[in-house]
Image: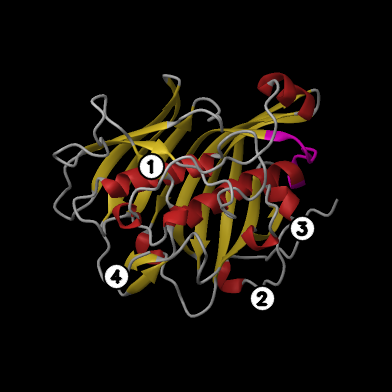
Amino acid sequence: MSRTICAPAAHAAALPRLTTTVPREFVHRAAVAEVLLTGWRREGEDRFLVTAQWPRGHSFFTPVAGAGGRRHDPMLVTETIRQVGSLIAHAEFDVPLGYQFLMWDLSVTTHPERLAVGPVPAELVLEVRCSDVRRRAGTLAGLRYDVVLRRDGAIAATGNASYTCASPEVYRRLRGNREPGLPTRTAPAVPPELVGRHSSFDVVLAPAASPAGGPADASAAGRAGRWLLRAEGDHPVLFDHPVDHIPGMVLLEAARQASAALAPAASAVTPASFTSSFHRYAELDLPCWIEAERDEPDAAGAFVSRVSGHQDGEPVFSCTITTTPPADPSVCQ
């Protein structure tokens, strides 16, 4: 297998024109349009250089408000880093296609001032270092990776994640009779403007009922809330292909929207950083409750939210988000 696909020799400032993406199978995407990575090469035993491109606009990862104009959605950083993990596993550690990946944690920190949407698509270089590489019978069983994302040579974001790999046989034993599929719409969306969205189609939270039967979306103080996860199976980005569980990116979007719902100002919906952990699979056919609480904003208007998801009383995931207010409230998602 070729170990390089259109990979550059230096940082973004020296990138040649990128005209292809990596194979969609390597990043677990059915739609080529959702592939963000454009090339890679090995730099050392555990180090790799990956290139990526972000479009100026996207149907779901829509630009957010920022000083001087629009900025790329920080969740686009998250999806880029997620794709890096599966690319390196398949392309460099020879994990066969068809293996399943179990993400255990994912953290991202962005530099919002370096995420500005420019006159052309953003060209990115990601420096990747792998650690805690574990093999079983000669095949990769799991690893941790750290990423430094550069744009024009400057650091725009950093992140890290860990996952384990399971063969189709092992995965079937883990999941029993769970078959890939898509969820059906089961609950109405909360108002899109409450969670920083324009369209209810992109909303992943539904109103929750309190024990007394009334609404329980947020406390009177606006510092805590509870919702039902709403998974739209026909969403072309969140559910790019049939799966037997709710994808981690859907859970992270739920955390982001819950944090936005608790924002002191409706426009403060931009996550600057987050740290997340995944505890078990989120099943398609069970209610998943999303609970969140936030701290008081600091002098600049930034605040921290803690979000968790539960099914059948068991934790599914947890996420801590630091949210910053946009400088220009006239620009939104």
Which residue was labeled with disc 3? 4
Label 1 packing within 10 angstroms: few (<14), some (14-19), many (20+): many
In which image quadrant can residue 22 be found?
A: bottom right
Q: Are marks 4 and 2 in contact (CB under 8 Å)?
A: no
The answer to whether residue 253 is above or below residue 306 is below
Residue 46 is left or right of residue 187, and the answer is right
Q: Main secondary structure of the magenta part?
A: loop
The front one of 18 and 279 is 279
Which residue was labeled with disc 1? 206
Q: Residue at x 45, y 20 (%)?
A: 312
Q: Are marks 3 and 1 in contact (CB under 8 Å)?
A: no
Q: Is residue 332 visible?
A: yes
The answer to whether residue 37 is above or below residue 85 is below
Which residue was labeled with disc 4? 67
Report the Cα–Cα distance between label 2 and label 1.
Answer: 43 Å
Report the Cα–Cα distance between label 3 and label 2.
Answer: 15 Å
| Residue type marked 3 | Thr
Report the Cα–Cα distance between label 1 and label 4.
Answer: 31 Å
The answer to whether residue 275 is above or below residue 237 is above
| Residue type marked 4 | Ala
Which residue was labeled with disc 2? 17
Q: Are marks 3 and 2 in contact (CB under 8 Å)?
A: no
Q: Where does residue 88 sit, x and y in percent of width and height?
A: 69, 45
In which image quadrant can residue 50 be found?
A: bottom right
Helix, strand or loop at label 2? It is loop
Label 3 packing within 10 angstroms: few (<14), some (14-19), many (20+): some
The front one of 248 and 195 is 195
Q: Residue at x 41, y 69 (%)?
A: 116
Mark nearer the N terminus (3 vs 2): 3
Q: Quadrant of the C terminus?
A: bottom left
